[in-house]
Image: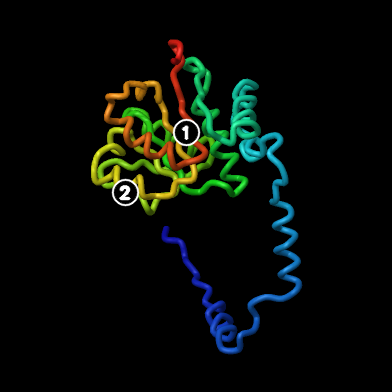
């Protein structure tokens, strides 16, 4: 069955008339409605998290909530998440990212992860946080995607590295960042360039060993 699609073109005539007469763009009633809508969405401070209100089906454990709240309230979004494996660093990072997006402070996002975790990160961000993350692999479109998930190996290679470094990202997440501790590791260079420019920045460590 092919659904019937109706294209409403009444707006075309109204738009043309507004262009010709320079009228009809707005009125006091519409202004007050827009102002009231803006007030209702305004978040006046950084105490507490707004994200859980928008994620009623996400099971957030107390330690994950507290971690995200600390990053937001006390660390300006720049943190190292060093929980042990399985305690939900992805959830914590997703909460922080969602919080900044809800508050209108973040739009352009870069998430660097091991190649084997690219799909998993995208799936979790989309399904659990309703964040439209997109994988960037063989033919990446860095400039045209707002929430990019890619492997560190892809990001370090040219021509990708130069393009990424010239994009004004609002937020960066680096997963498995403990693998970058070796200063001779070529993957570290792209991360250093981003660290100098970007805030907030979330580093996710697998804390099976002590971190120097």
Q: Residue at x 75, y 71 (%)?
A: 29
> Farthest residue in the top direction?
209
Q: Residue furthest bottom?
A: 21
Q: Residues within 10 Å of mark 2 (few under 14, many from 20)?
A: few
Q: Pinpoint residue 80: horizontal percent, then vertical percent.
A: 50, 25
Query: Badge 1 is on which residue?
Result: 124
The label number, if any, that marks residue 16 in the structure image: none
Inter-mark Cα distance, 1 to 2: 26 Å
Please tell me whether mark 1 sits on a helix, a strand or a loop. Answer: helix
Is 135 positioned to the left or the right of 205 in the image? left
Image-based side of 41 in relation to 152, left or right: right
Considering the numbered disc 2 on the image, is that residue within a helix, a strand or a loop? helix
Q: Are marks 1 and 2 in contact (CB under 8 Å)?
A: no
Q: Residue at x 44, y 15 (%)?
A: 212
Foreground mark, 1 or 2, reads 2
Point out residue 76 in the picture as x, y percentages from the top left corner: 59, 36
Relative to 153, say whether 19 is above or below.
Answer: below
Number of marks present in the image shown: 2
Which image quadrant is residue 92 in? top right
Q: Position of residue 105 (x, y in %)?
A: 57, 47
Does 65 appear above or below 193?
above
Earlier residue among tags 1 and 2: 1
Relative horizontal placement of residue 43, taking residue 110 as reference (left or right): right
Residue that mark 2 sits on: 163
Quarter that holds the N terminus: bottom left
Q: Tell me residue 135's x, y (percent).
A: 36, 41
* The quarter of the displayed image where residue 196 is located: top left
Which of these two is toward me, 39 or 59? 39
């Amino acid at each position: 069955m092919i659904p019937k699609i109706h294209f409403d073109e009444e707006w075309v005539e109204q738009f043309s008339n507004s262009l010709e007469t320079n009228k009809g763009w707005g009125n006091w009633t519409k202004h007050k409605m827009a102002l009231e809508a803006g007030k209702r969405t305004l978040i006046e401070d950084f105490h507490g998290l707004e994200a859980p209100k928008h994620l009623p089906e996400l099971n957030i454990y107390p330690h994950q909530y507290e971690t995200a709240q600390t990053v937001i309230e006390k660390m300006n979004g720049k943190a190292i998440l060093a929980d042990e494996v399985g305690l939900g660093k992805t959830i914590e990072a997703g909460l922080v990212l969602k919080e900044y997006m809800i508050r209108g402070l973040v739009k352009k996002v870069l998430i660097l992860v091991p190649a084997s975790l690219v799909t998993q990160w995208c799936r979790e961000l989309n399904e659990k946080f309703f964040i439209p993350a997109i994988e960037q692999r063989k033919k990446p479109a860095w400039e045209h995607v707002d929430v990019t998930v890619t492997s560190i190996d892809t990001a370090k290679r040219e021509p990708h590295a130069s393009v990424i470094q010239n994009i004004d990202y609002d937020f960066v997440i680096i997963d498995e960042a403990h693998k970058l501790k070796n200063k001779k590791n070529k993957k570290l260079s792209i991360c250093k360039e981003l660290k100098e420019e970007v805030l907030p920045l979330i580093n996710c460590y697998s804390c099976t060993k002590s971190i120097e």
